[in-house]
Image (tube, grey):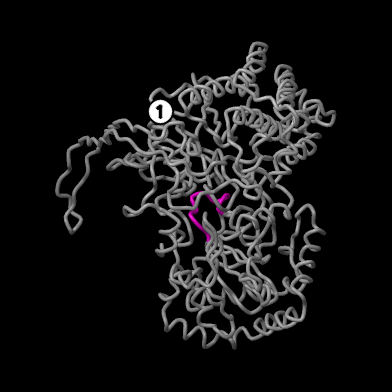
Amino acid sequence: MSDISPHLLRSDALSYLVESKVGSSRNAVKANLVDKIVYDDPAVFRRLRTHQVNDNFVASCAASFQAVNADDIETLKGVAARALNQKVEDLEEEEAADKASDPKKEEKSGNHGSAEEKKMYKPLVRLFNYIANFGQATAPRNFERTGIMLKPEEPHTFGFPSCSPDIIITPYGVKASTSKQWRDRDAFGEVKPSNKQRPKPATAGTIPDIVIQSANYARLFMSCRPFMLFCVGILIFGTEFSVGIFDRDGITFSPAYDMFKDTEMFIRVVRSMACNLSIQELGSDPTVTVLDDDETRRLNGITARGRVYPSAVVTSVGNDPRKWCTIGPPIWTSLSLLGRGTNVWRVREYVEEVDKQPCIRGNEMVLKTAWRSSARTPESDIYMSITQPPEGLAKFECGGDVCIAGYPIAVQNLRSHPVYTFLRDGDIDPPTPVLHRLVLAHKDLCDQGILHRDISAGNVLLTANPNASLRGFITDLEFARIVSSSLTKPEVTVTRTISPKNRYDDQGRLLFRTQGTASTHTTFASTVTVKRGASMTGTAQFMARAILRASSSTVHQAQHDVESFIWVLAYCVMRNLCDRASRPSAPQDARAQYTVLKSLFSVTFSQTTARTIAAQRQSGSLGLIFPTDDDVEAIVKNFMSDPLVNLFATLGGLVHKATDPFEPYPLTHDDLLAPVNDAIALLP
């Protein structure tokens, strides 16, 4: 994907990995949105196809709207009138106090908000659904107030914040009162009681709270529901409304209208969102088909009943004609609104044959989807330029920009046209020998003039088969720094087998059956110029302390990637320990300490500014010294081997040398490999 502005890492532009305090998260979201918001853009309504809502329908609905809903309209007007007499600061302080009174986020009756705001929820839902269902029995989507918090209950949403938008738009048939999953939502709404709480600020350069809250919901929505290119939210402030479209390069807001003075426009927006727009027009990637539960179970051989994580069929990648089927939830999901929005999946080839049900075949592979800057060399070009790929680097199969009808999916095109690392359930010691191989692979790349610069939990993966010859590998070379000024792309030939197909006439009668054949596509060797892009890149939670604390002129070097490997190992081990200690099958003494370990994990990997992350990237970090903490002793005793515990102590010493404020020692690959090799030698 292309044509998105470069996502430079700043102290306020971070990749969110685990739950943190709402205030901190929103402050970081706010900082990221500077210069990324467009107001009063009528193109939003064009993308929502409001002009295509039938004029006769709009007139008929508007004729009865005020009279039938008089009580609810009076209630909403009364709330807005009273709120106008209050300062915006007072209303927002009241909402903040409501949040503070519910630290465990167990709000049952609705989302947090001021007393006046909460009076708006039910009347608004009734108005929305009156329009949605007008003239028909049931609309394809419902507007609802959920009585529960949306909680992260799936593997790829571990540590995501729990929250609930004021209004949710769900597909017909979904029980929003019981479902806690974002993937059961198609859009959302945010409510404020005063017309003064509009998204467009009264003072230039400021970002109102309603925008920050909506952006926070949008990042969660697109992270928990992968393959969303953008998402849509309707914002209500007093008696006025505006629609926001949230994508990887910012937010675009429509002009604001009054629900009761500009009723016909209100009807067009609500009706279109509820009835007329496809899920693709609400942001889902049109090149991806999400399968239902029955088809997911059939393809993957799942016999258990109940809901499963849906598989999705991804169309051809680059020049490769094959389709791919995802298996289970993502291995990694980025929790950021702006930037690359990376997702990493396990996939197998998806095959459709004549007169046969589709099936999946071949080896399990890894698929990474991410937005890229047009100012950067495509990652696939970098992979293809490596003449001798080291063992431990992901083997490149295919890649390229995703296109619709020949046009690349880019933020500019979308706006201008309406249209964990994971560990196995077993022992956690396998990361130690795997780490050895990955560090060697990184060293080999450095020797070839390629510095990765983004060693993180999302880019260091393990194979599902513990007996595989290659247990782990590094992915994601998009942010790599390349010494050479150009890359040589080798000649690549892809052969595709074409199955026999039936041909029919206009009446549906079989005419003949074609013969099976094969087609060959060759991409000839070429040389491309390296695009340098951002000088400071990476995933903040795994960055070396020196990078986090330095100025933008600091050069990212191999020593910083070596330190990042240490933080990736700490993240993997702590996360796996949290998972295993939380299971019903875990020893009772270990289960009793789960909450403490989760808190240590959160402190280590939940910070949202460069300064607070840097405070945990030193030898005294909880991520390195937790094995000696008496409060998690049972977990360590049950699930960590002595060599792994000792390795953490040694790594703490290395980090101490690397982060010495007076004489920092530049870590080398050999510095890290030595204790890792010692630990491997002591493994049973």
235, 375: nearer the viewer: 375
Q: Is 230 one of the magenta-colored residues?
A: yes
* Depicted 25 relative to depicted 498: above or below: below
Q: Identity of the amino acid at label 1?
A: Ile
- Residue 525: tell me if it is visible: yes
Observer-nearest of 223 and 360: 223
Looking at the image, residue 88 sits to the left or right of residue 283; the answer is right
Give the tally of numbered discs. 1
The residue located at (58%, 50%) in the rendering is 224
- Note whether 667 is above or below 72 in the view shown: above
Is residue 164 toward the left or the right of residue 302 in the image?
Answer: right
Quadrant into which the C terminus falls: top right
Toward the viewer: 103 or 299?
Answer: 103
State yes or no: residue 666 in magenta.
no
- Can you see residue 170? no
Rendered location of residue 306, percent (x, y): 56, 46
Q: Secondary structure at mark 1?
A: loop
Q: Looking at the picture, does residue 170 appear above or below residue 158?
A: below
Eyeballing the image, is 204 above or below 409?
Answer: below
Can you tell which quarter of the image residue 660 is in? Answer: top right
Q: Determine the residue positioned at 68% across, 35% down.
A: 545
The image shows residue 90 at horizontal and vertical percentages of: 79, 71
Is the residue marked by circle 1 packed among few (<14), some (14-19), or many (20+) residues within 10 Å? some
Helix, strand or loop for the magenta stretch, by majority: loop
Residue drawn at x 52%, y 78% is: 267
Q: Identify the magenta region.
A: 222-231
What residue is pinned by disc 1? 386
User: Where does residue 617 sit, x and y in percent of width and height?
Assistant: 71, 34
User: For residue 114, which quarter of the picture?
Assistant: bottom right
